[in-house]
Image: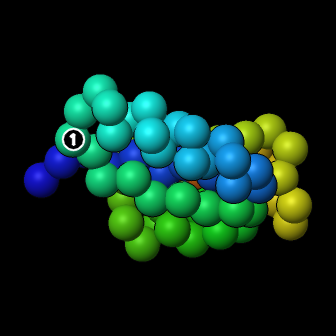
Amino acid sequence: MPPRILIADDSALLRAALRGLFSEIGDYEIMEAETGAEAVAKAEASRPNVIILDFAMPEMDGLSATRVLRKRLPEIP
């Protein structure tokens, strides 16, 4: 199973660019979220190996999402 990466950013363009970058350098399962709240929900459901969070997102910013994720999923770096 390839490593799972969750990319959370409200910019579809940036998510697509990061997806393309990771596709070029290796075999990864890429998941995307548009908001911090969506990132938390997807991370809890899929347990990614790595999470990349934008700082300024609607509903829940990246810092708040990080705090929630660190409490709920401490095993994810």
Q: Is residue 58 above or below residue 26?
A: below
Q: Nearer the viewer, residue 76 or 4?
A: 4
Is residue 20 toward the left or the right of residue 66 in the image?
left
Q: Residues within 10 Å of mark 1 (few under 14, many from 20)?
A: few
Q: Position of residue 66 (x, y in %)?
A: 67, 44
| Residue at the top extreme of this rendering | 25
Is residue 17 toward the left or the right of residue 19 in the image?
right
Q: Quadrant of the C terminus?
A: top left
Q: Nearer the viewer, residue 9 or 41?
A: 9
Q: Residue at (51%, 68%) from the top-left corner? A: 42
Q: Residue at (28%, 45%) from the top-left corner? A: 28
Q: Position of residue 26 (x, y in %)?
A: 24, 33
- Secondary element type, mark 1: loop
Q: Is residue 62 above or below residue 73?
A: above
Is residue 33 visible to us here?
A: yes
Give the total of numbered labels: 1
Q: Is residue 16 above or below residue 72?
A: above
**Disc 1 residue type?**
Asp
Q: Position of residue 44 (x, y in %)?
A: 47, 67
Is residue 52 visible to us here?
A: no
According to the image, label 1 marks what residue? 27
Q: Nearer the viewer, residue 71 or 48?
A: 48
Q: Position of residue 11 (x, y in %)?
A: 75, 51
Q: Quadrant of residue 58?
A: bottom right
Q: Residue at (80%, 39%) from the top-left corner? A: 55
Is residue 9 toward the left or the right of residue 42 in the image?
right
